[in-house]
Image (cartoon, rainbow, N blue to C red):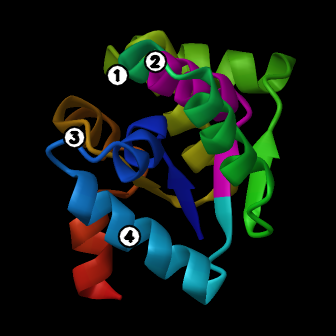
Amino acid sequence: MLTVDANVWIASHQSGEPSHAECRSFVREITRRMTPLHAPQLVEVECACAVARRTRNTQMAEAVHRSLRILPSLELHLLDDSMVLLAVKLGTSLFLRGADAIYVATAHRTLTTLITLDAEVRRRASAVVPCLLPSEWLAAN
């Protein structure tokens, strides 16, 4: 089971991203395997808005959003009070950005590995959750 950061989903859809090929391969493989996936519901907003902002193409952004919503193996987690408290606790103790703390809290709560491109998140969060690059997960699996 994995928690996948928005930066991985975004890079998998954006051919201009440096990690595009790695993330595209990763997403294809986890989709093919029906790997159980977790993410905070925030991922929908982050991905759609990032794609729209970069491409100025709302149809592409909506397509990215739909692709997340139809993934049968993806469980989205609401940002309820207990998740907020956990994200605040982890984020303030690990000195994470707000959205990053929500992904780390999701991985922590679901006992999953966090897949992220963010080196700072991997370095800081590895004390509380396993963290890998998409290519590291592919190599190990």
Residues under numbered marks 1 and 4 in contact, where contact means CB atoms less than 8 Å apart: no
Residue type marked 3:
Glu
Q: How far apart are marks 1 and 3 (CA)?
A: 27 Å
Residue type marked 1:
Leu
Viewer-proximal residue among 62 and 134:
62
Residue 90 visible here: no
Q: Dividing the image into 4 quarters, which one contains the N terminus?
A: bottom right
Residue type marked 4:
Phe
Residue 71 position (above or below residue 88)? below
Q: How far apart are marks 1 and 2 (CA)?
A: 5 Å
Instruction: Give the residue drawn at x 64%, y 63%.
Output: 37
| Residue for badge 1 | 94
Q: What label does residue 17 carry, if any?
A: 3
Viewer-proximal residue among 75 and 122:
75
Q: What element carries label 3?
A: loop
Q: Dividing the image into 4 quarters, which one contains the C terminus?
A: bottom left
Residue 20 position (above or below residue 44)? below
Between disc 2 and disc 4, whose residue precedes?
A: 4
Q: What element carries label 4?
A: helix
Q: How far apart are marks 4 and 3 (CA)?
A: 14 Å
Q: Is the magenta stretch mostly helix, strand or loop?
A: helix
Residues under numbered marks 2 and 3 in contact, where contact means CB atoms less than 8 Å apart: no
Q: What element carries label 1?
A: helix
| Residue for badge 4 | 26
| Residue for badge 2 | 91
Discs 2/3, front:
3
